[in-house]
Amino acid sequence: MRMVENKVSMVNLRRKGEEIRQFILDNVHSHPRDIVTFTAGRFHLTHQAVSKHIKNLIAQGLLNLKGKTKDRYYSLTELTSSSFTYSLDGNLKEDVVWSRDIRPLFSELPDNVVRIWQHGITEIINNAIDHSAGTLVNVRVKKTAVTSEVLIWDDGVGIFKKIARELNLEDERHAVLELAKGKVTTDPRHHSGEGIFFTSRMFDYFMILSNQIMFSHEFHTSTDLVGERFMNGTEGTNVFLQIKNNSARTIKQVFDEFSSGDFLFSKTVVPVWLAQYGSDRLVSRSQAKRLLAGIEKFEIVVFDFTNVDFIGQGFADEIFRVFAKYHPDITIEYINANRDIEDMVKRVRHGTDTSQPELF
């Protein structure tokens, strides 16, 4: 009996040790200098006990230690660091790049994560092949014990510039707004426009950086997509993908979240603040129409008011009364609205608009 109890105790002790070491790996990036103290507090351990686990991880080659005494800090070891460059000469095939060069680097990852990587990498490389008008594409792969990340760069015209030019948009920031909605493509005969949208939803972190515009999405945040201007431009298009190696997410879950019963891409979340430029507030019907462009393709449209503190009556009326009146088959919802915005939406939904229409 005592032998059985000892075996159970050893198994529990081993599991606890694995939990502690996984916690260290998961949190060392955000706590590079105080990971010992942080872990000790979480598990009610002594610093000495945590240090033993850290030494174990260093011995396994999963963790690095740099600096001495007060300058000491820890970081995850790069288990894989590879780079591949391909010519966009008309002969490149994204499935060959994946199966020959990239897939072997992810061989030990769970099948669901490998499928996400296959979807994302082939989608982005195909966009470079079909749309970039560039001469080469570079793929860089990095992997640690916790996450894998891929950076794909092409030297083409730039994705936002290409979309703005082909769709006659006012500027490149408007192109970000259209990407955020989904179903935007410059080649509707050969592409659905859904690829980048769904790819952005599959990864823990997704980012496009092109010229002076960044377009990103973090899976764990309530806000879907964010765009910002940068002082230093970046030629071509850079796409960054990152996901945890042990993620339980599946491609089916991501598609189901934005699909109806007939499996069609039927729902979108629109980041409202991308419709405003500079310090301008969202007050006009023209701004609302910019936001509404293309959303008739969806059954459910959710307007996300993160980073928006005010909307005018004309702007609100155009979306929540006029558009809703002429598109009764579309469900219009909103999230992350403050009290003033909610009051304005309720006012136009339950009353008649008295603002003057725009003449120009």
Image (tube, rainbow, N blue to C red):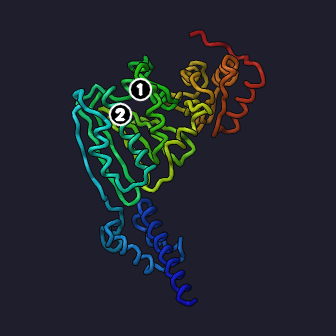
Residue 130 point in image, percent of width and height: 33, 26
**Position above or below: 1 against 350:** below
Q: Nearer the viewer, residue 83 or 308?
A: 83
Q: Local crowd at mark 1 within 10 Å, few (<14), some, or many (≥20)?
A: many
Choose top left, top right, bottom left or bottom right for residue 352: top right
Q: Secondary structure at mark 1?
A: helix
Name the residue type under label 1.
Answer: Glu
**Position above or below: 331 against 111:** above
Q: Residue furthest right?
A: 350
Choose top left, top right, bottom left or bottom right for residue 128: top left
Q: Are marks 2 and 1 in contact (CB under 8 Å)?
A: yes
Let me know if residue 287 appears in the view: no
Q: Residue furthest bottom?
A: 2
- Quadrant location of the C terminus? top right
Residue 95 point in image, percent of width and height: 32, 37
Residue at (66% x, 29% y) in the render = 332
Say whether residue 206 is left or right of residue 141: right
- Quadrant location of the N terminus? bottom right
Residue 121 point in image, percent of width and height: 36, 40
Name the residue type under label 2.
Answer: Ser
**Position above or below: 266 against 170:** below
Q: Nearer the viewer, residue 336 or 15?
A: 15
Q: Residue at label 1?
A: 172
Q: Secondary structure at mark 2?
A: strand
Q: Local crowd at mark 2 within 10 Å, few (<14), some, or many (≥20)?
A: many
Q: Nearer the viewer, residue 22 or 2?
A: 2
Q: Residue at label 2?
A: 210
Choose top left, top right, bottom left or bottom right for residue 137: top left
Residue at (22% x, 28% y) in the render = 89
**Position above or below: 27 against 95:** below
Instruction: Give the CA separation, mark 2 to mark 1.
Output: 10 Å
Q: Which mark is residue 45?
A: none
